[in-house]
Image (cartoon, rainbow, N blue to C red):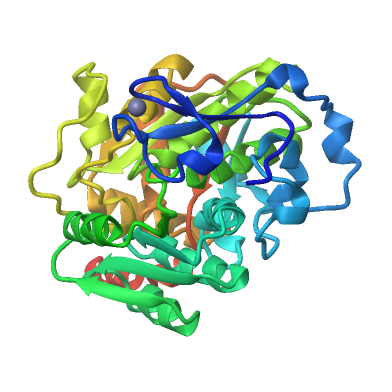
Amino acid sequence: METNAAFAGVTCTDCAETFEAADAPGRCPSCGGVLDVEYDYDALDVSRETFEDRGERSQWRYRELLPFAREAAVTTDEGGTPLVSVPALAEEFGVEAVYVKDEGRNPTGTIDDRAQSVAATAAREADATDVALASTGDDGQSAAAYAARAGLESHTFVPTRASFTNKAMVNVHGGDMSVVEGRIGDADAAFADAVDEHDDWHPVQVFSTPFAHEGLKTTYFEVAEALDWTAPDHVINPTGRGAGLYALYKAATEVADLGLVADVPQVHAAQAEGCAPIVRAFEEERDSHEPWDAPDTICGRIEIPDPVGSPLALEALRESGGDAVAAPDPEILEGATSLAESAGLELGASSGAAVAAAYALHERDAFDADDVLVLVNAGAGSKDDDILRSHLMGKGI
Ligand SMILES: [Zn+2]
């Protein structure tokens, strides 16, 4: 594998052993733990101008802080998404500014494109022929797209409840799809069995490979640069597997340690009450989650009852001084539809959790008058048109 100069291997977050990238494409070969990419930051020679002087708008603008060279990238120009201000919310919360980082504007309409770009690059660098993942829908669609771009076969395991759009688009990209009866836990199990059987399949699911969540970091780099290299005070992230949350925190500490940005924001987790293992673990002050027994939320994207990367997400919450909020489905859907109506923004149903959590944090007096808030919209609202419209019809609209 051809990696960047500062790339220093992948390290197990459980047993702390470090491996060469080529030796550990999935989980830790020693203990099965989640692997994370490490860099030799002293070997990095970057400044704000390094990035500002580039014409490139895609996430590969921040190539030095990714594992692979720009020439190697499997990319459809993901990233470069706008940070859109929502003055009405800022006024309501009594804060300086509220922004939505609108990841729905990515090539397949989700933040997952950032992850799949880097994961597909890793797979191609490893001379893989096939990639595989279990998916609630969006990342499966994205993985199929990036596998197609890279000339790889993709194998996606989705639960029956995944949306029609996601399933259809996996097919449209020429991907192989297994629709697994049940929910995401059943799809995860089918994926694990299939990977055991096909040991040449390269995993591309977040936390099943170190290279997927690594791509999600670029979301934060863009936020910091858009705010003229300052950190927002709060970032509120809709949270399922916890990869986005951890990546935001990792990115924030990287640019702080490199002296590009002075501060690190508080990162907050937003989950649905019907499946909130990370929120519960945070409230009970545990270092990892207990699997959620009976997940039940309309927000399929974040319905992850057994998020294997929870220790990393919980570390991000605690180290950054953040909080964790579980909101009921109607408040989450109201969060998404209210911004559609009042601000013209199209948030995915699950990302309404970030809006609902912002209201809850406001109630908890978490915000100061000079605070800047960023809410992450992880996916395009139009992918969830039926769920969002049903919410309005439920209100008699
Ligand atoms: Zn290990």
Q: In terms of image quadrants, where is residue 179?
A: bottom left
- Between 4 and 41, the one lying in front of the other is 4
- Picture coordinates of residue 305, whole percent (x, y): 20, 45
Report the side of 301 relative to 117 (left or right): left
Report the side of 51 relative to 7 (left or right): right
- Picture coordinates of residue 385, whole percent (x, y): 39, 73
Tell me if I can see residue 319 in this picture.
Answer: yes
For ligand 1, give the image quadrant: top left
Which quadrant is home to the C terminus?
Answer: bottom left
Q: Residue furthest left?
A: 293
- Between 86 and 112, the one lying in front of the other is 112
- Between 177 and 264, the one lying in front of the other is 177
Q: In terms of image quadrants, where is residue 374?
A: top right
Total numbered labels placed on residues in the image = 0
Residue occupying the point 61% across, 71% down: 149
- Picture coordinates of residue 317, whole percent (x, y): 40, 23
Q: In terms of image quadrants, where is residue 207?
A: top left
Tell me if I can see residue 108 in this picture.
Answer: no
Report the side of 394 relative to 227 (left or right): left
Residue occupying the point 53% across, 52% down: 119
- Picture coordinates of residue 10, whole percent (x, y): 51, 31
* Above-or-below relation of 189 to 359: below
Residue occupying the point 72% across, 25% down: 230
* Above-or-below relation of 30 to 210: above
